[in-house]
Image (cartoon, rainbow, N blue to C red):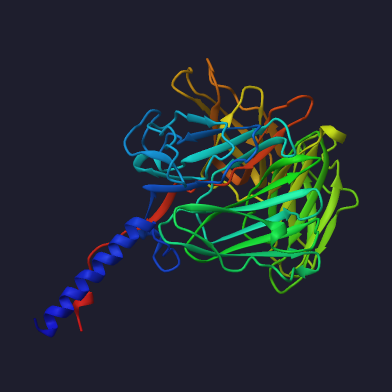
Amino acid sequence: MNRSTLSLAGAVVALAVLTGAASMTGGDDSHTAPAASASRLPVQRSTLLCPEPSTSEFADTTYTSFTPPGSGSGTGASGGDATLLPATPKPKALKPLTATGKPVTSSTDKSDSPALIGTANGPLAPGWSVQQTTVVSDGPGRGLLGTSCVAPDSEFWFPGASTQDGRQDYVHLVNPDETPAVVDVDLYGKDGQLKGSTGDGITVPGNSSKPVLLSTLIADKVQDLTVHVVARSGRVGAAVQATDNKAGTDWLPAAAQPAGDLVMPGIPADATDVRLITYAPGSDDADLTLKLATSTGSITPAGHETLHVRSGMTTAVDLGDLTKGDAGSLVIGSSSSHSPVPVVAALRITRGKGSKQEIAFLPATSPIDRQATVADNRAKGSTLALTATGKDVSVKITSSAGSTAGTAAGKTVTVKAGSTLSMAPSEPSGLKGSYAVTVQRLSGGQLYASRMLALPLDGVPMFTIQPMPDDQGMVDVPQAASDLRVLQH
């Protein structure tokens, strides 16, 4: 074979590799390719990871899997598959999802229930979501824990963790791949990074999970921590399970990536205490403005107009009963005195008082570009919070139940700029069991959303809040074609 033949073969291989990469990844070449060269197409494969639910003997966990109809397929469209497999080999797979628009539910009451690794293909991949809901009826972990199972990634931020007395916080790491992942877990308090941490180089074996108790990483008793999870190699799913011996328990989801403007949508109207935890990861201090987007518009919380966050340090402030009977959303902005400084942030929210308290966490949430879904909604137990910034936003809300129920229910609403619309989603007719809710942004400004699920038990106002970022069900795929000009030398 001569040099010309080798060059031709190499060029053909290069074209094949480039074309294949574009079709599998959706192409992240938007900065170099003309906008007209990309098509907006549904994803063909989705991966979700669910952490170990609870080690309590009093825990009951429900998993709800759902893919909204769309991308040219209506309710009941089949083809492909969506399956949740245990990260340990012995337990059986959960009931698979087989059609769009119809949620599928599985449950367990085992205290050794494993983490789950899920994959959806074909028509079931775009917008696929899994909700993990656990009720712990007694014991120190008493409470309602809810989390949306997460896509694997290489970096996560968790403002709001703690190692103070009475708290037991675990960061759960799930590795979906066959090869081991190596992960660093860094902890930051009010004076900066905590020394003596043993969270560097944690190995998570392939197709497995590892819970790490934060108090084993440092000796300090710290009320407010920011946890930074970074995968040196491989990828993981991560979530923090926070247990307070007096105030209940819940999952702390990862916060939106650092930014100068953040929104935490959906603080309940009856919140008895709201605590804001922030962290500035860069080299500059951040001067922030705080506003509360209420049902009638934005107001500045009295006594909490601004917040100074020192670089590399966790800053927390108690906002008290911030909402005062009117559900709202906290909107963080950058001071006009200097350029915006990116921060991460989350809220610890308390409902109830005394021995009847319950906590939940609400991190800063990414906006909904197209749509977002949250599964496992219960009759009279779910509340949606929708917040608009910039301009009014037109939103379509659709509630979908399983095959035993009647038709889906939907409505279109307008969320005024700078305000929060708190509402119970419409329930599907003939509802039996739980249902899924899909929020679609139709037009207007930026839209942020969350869902609160409230399941009171024995006088305790048990609740959990799930942020609703965009489901990333559609991606830009650059058009790829052969170009024989690459053969010229």
Q: Position of residue 323 (x, y in %)?
A: 82, 39
| Count of marks overlaid on the render | 0
Q: Residue at point 64% right, 65% down? A: 199
**Residue found farthest to the top:** 430
Question: Could you tell me which quadrant the C terminus lies in?
Answer: bottom left
Displayed quadrant of residue 377 = top right
Displayed quadrant of residue 12 = bottom left
Q: Is residue 172 visible?
A: yes
Up/down of 377 relative to 258, above or below: above
Q: Residue at point 71% right, 67% down? A: 341
The foreground one among 482 and 400 is: 400
Up/down of 211 relative to 53, above or below: below
Q: Position of residue 442 (x, y in %)?
A: 53, 39
Q: Position of residue 335 (x, y in %)?
A: 78, 63
Q: Residue at point 29% right, 60% down? A: 20
Up/down of 477 relative to 249, above or below: below
Question: Could you tell me which quadrant the N terminus lies in?
Answer: bottom left
Up/down of 52 relative to 24, above or below: above
Q: Residue at point 47% right, 19% down? A: 407
**Residue found farthest to the right:** 303
Displayed quadrant of residue 221 = bottom right
**Residue found farthest to the left:** 1
Q: Position of residue 48 (x, y in %)?
A: 48, 47
Left or right of residue 465: residue 4: left
The foreground one among 474 and 316 is: 316
Q: Is residue 344 visible?
A: no
